[in-house]
Image (spheres, rainbow, N blue to C red):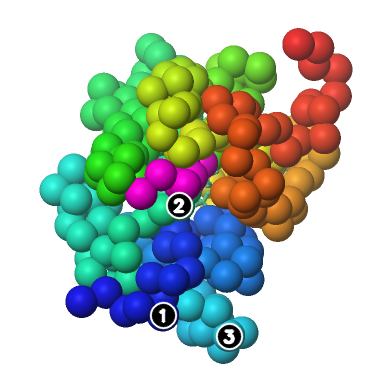
Amino acid sequence: MPSPDAAARRVALLTGGARGIGAAVARRLAADGHAVAVDYATSGAEAEALVEEIRGAGGTAECLQADVTDPAAVTGLVERVTALWAAPSVLVNNAGMNLTASARRLDPADWDRVIGVNLSGAFYCTHAVLPAMYEAGHSRIVFVGSPAAGRSVLPGTGAYAAAKAGVGALVEVLAKETARRGITVNSVIPGFVETGMTRGEGERAMEVLRGQWPEIPPDAVADAVSYLVSDRAAHVSGEQLGVWLGGPSGLHR
Ligand SMILES: NC(=O)c1ccc[n+]([C@@H]2O[C@H](COP(=O)([O-])OP(=O)(O)OC[C@H]3O[C@@H](n4cnc5c(N)ncnc54)[C@H](OP(=O)(O)O)[C@@H]3O)[C@@H](O)[C@H]2O)c1
């Protein structure tokens, strides 16, 4: 049986929550009073430490392993969260990755992996939580998108840009499908945030990014997510909320 205390809080499922932007979102949602299910793929130790930290601060959190590219694992993840507390009324599709290579060089398996994590994985999670959200109403879905989806494309990011553009389209369709169900669907679009993902691009790329983009702290992205899942945003759906201070210098949309 789900715990009645935790079920009284809003239950938030956050993918890729162990580190980077996800960890900031986990802390913020817990501080807002959510019971937070921190999904991780490989960062088990970081996820455990984060959950301990949240509990130490008086919050409610649990970490659960699931690779979002595996639909059966995602179904199991939602079942485990539901058994623990209650069906998630908040989903944050944060899990993401990038593999940089020109279209000429990009291995099709790497294309599939990037699309799988950023787009298909987000769809699998959404698909798995929607039945209970349709029943409950009053639910929130937030995707973490990217300026790479069209406002600021870079060579070598074809798979990532295509995946995040897909996310943007999915958000708009989902918002229309759920408009009369009490469910809102939005995305946050972070600018340059220093995390494992951006550090993975190498020091030279980091220098270029730092030179062009105002650096955004992970907490600023978490604040935007916090707003979009709050009661204050009950009538905001289908939106892309940029957290990027105007974007890269010299870029005009
Ligand atoms: N950093 C930026 O400048 C920036 C800008 C725009 C958008 N974003 C987006 O922000 C989100 C978070 O990225 P980040 O910058 O915080 O990067 P990060 O520190 O590298 O974190 C990526 C997260 O995604 C998780 N993940 C990767 N593959 C997964 C899978 N198959 N299943 C479940 N989780 C998986 C990782 O989990 P494990 O560690 O457990 O494997 C990790 O928690 C991504 O969607 C990214 O595209 C980032």
- The residues tagged by marks 1 and 3 sit, at their Cα atoms, a distance apart of 14 Å
In the picture provided, is 225 more to the left or to the right than 12? right
Q: Amino acid at mark 2?
A: Val
Type of amino acid at the residue the image marks with label 1? Asp
Report the magenta residues as a range: 136-142
Reply above or below: 191 against 216: above
Name the disc covering residue 5, or none: 1
Q: Residue furthest bottom?
A: 56
- Return the mark for residue 90: 2
Query: CB atoms at circles 3 and 2 under 8 Å apart?
Result: no
Residue at the location (53% across, 56% down)? 22
Tag in front: 1 or 3:
1
Q: Position of residue 154 (x, y in %)?
A: 60, 19
Who comes first in sequence, dot 3 or dot 2? Answer: 3
Q: Is mark 3 within 8 Å of ligand 1?
A: no
Q: The residue tagged with tag 2: helix, strand or loop?
A: strand
- Please name whichever residue, 11 or 213, is drawn nearer the observer in this view of the structure: 11
Q: Is residue 139 magenta?
A: yes
Determine whether the residue tagged by mark 3 lies in a helix, strand or loop.
Answer: loop
Q: Badge 3: how crowded within 10 Å, few (<14), some, or many (20+)? A: few
- Image check: 59 left or right of 132? right
